[in-house]
């Protein structure tokens, strides 16, 4: 996956999907990212991951909000290991982004 950190992209993708709603704001992504990983991505990390997810067609951006695309939803469903298995889901996402197989 070029020079993009698969862990970062997986973390941000999960942080968007975490909200389970149509559109999220950057601030919401930062909140869920902290809840998932006990850290807050900096602006450059967030922008890098969002660009990668946009390029792969997994998310869509519209007027300051971000949403998971249809292909992103299908991808999220295929990697979801269940509500009590957040870590396992994150590892599954990371493996897909690391192999370049996401979308």
Image (cartoon, rainbow, N blue to C red):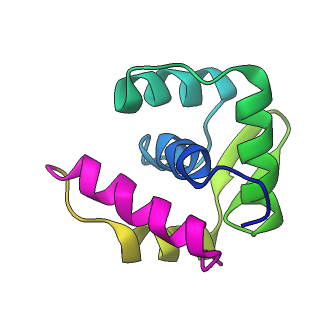
Q: Main secondary structure of the magenta part?
A: helix
Q: Position of residue 81 (x, y in %)?
A: 24, 65
- On-image quarter of the C terminus: bottom right
Query: Which residues are the magenta region?
Result: 84-103
Q: Which corner quadrant of the image does residue 1 belong to? A: bottom right
Viewer-nearest residue: 102 or 3: 3
Viewer-nearest residue: 17 or 41: 41
**In the rendered structure, does residue 99 fall within the stretch colored magenta?**
yes
What residue is drawn where x is 53% and y is 48%? 7
What residue is drawn where x is 54% and y is 19%? 40
Q: Does 74 appear above or below 27? A: below
Q: Position of residue 3 (x, y in %)?
A: 78, 55
Q: Does 56 appear above or below 11? A: below
Viewer-nearest residue: 62 or 54: 54
Q: Is residue 19 left or right of residue 3?
A: left
Q: How many marks?
A: 0
Q: Is residue 58 left or right of residue 62?
A: left
Outermost residue on the left side: it is 84
């Amino acid at each position: 996956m070029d020079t993009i950190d698969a862990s970062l992209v997986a973390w941000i993708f999960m942080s968007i999907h975490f909200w389970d709603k149509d559109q999220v704001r950057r601030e919401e992504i930062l909140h869920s990212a902290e809840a998932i990983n006990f850290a807050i991505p900096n602006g450059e990390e967030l922008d890098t991951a969002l660009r990668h997810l946009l390029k792969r067609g997994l998310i869509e951006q519209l007027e300051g909000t971000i949403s998971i695309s249809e292909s992103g939803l299908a991808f999220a469903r295929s990697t979801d290991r269940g509500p009590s298995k957040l870590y396992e889901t994150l590892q599954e996402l990371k493996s897909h982004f690391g192999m370049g197989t996401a979308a």
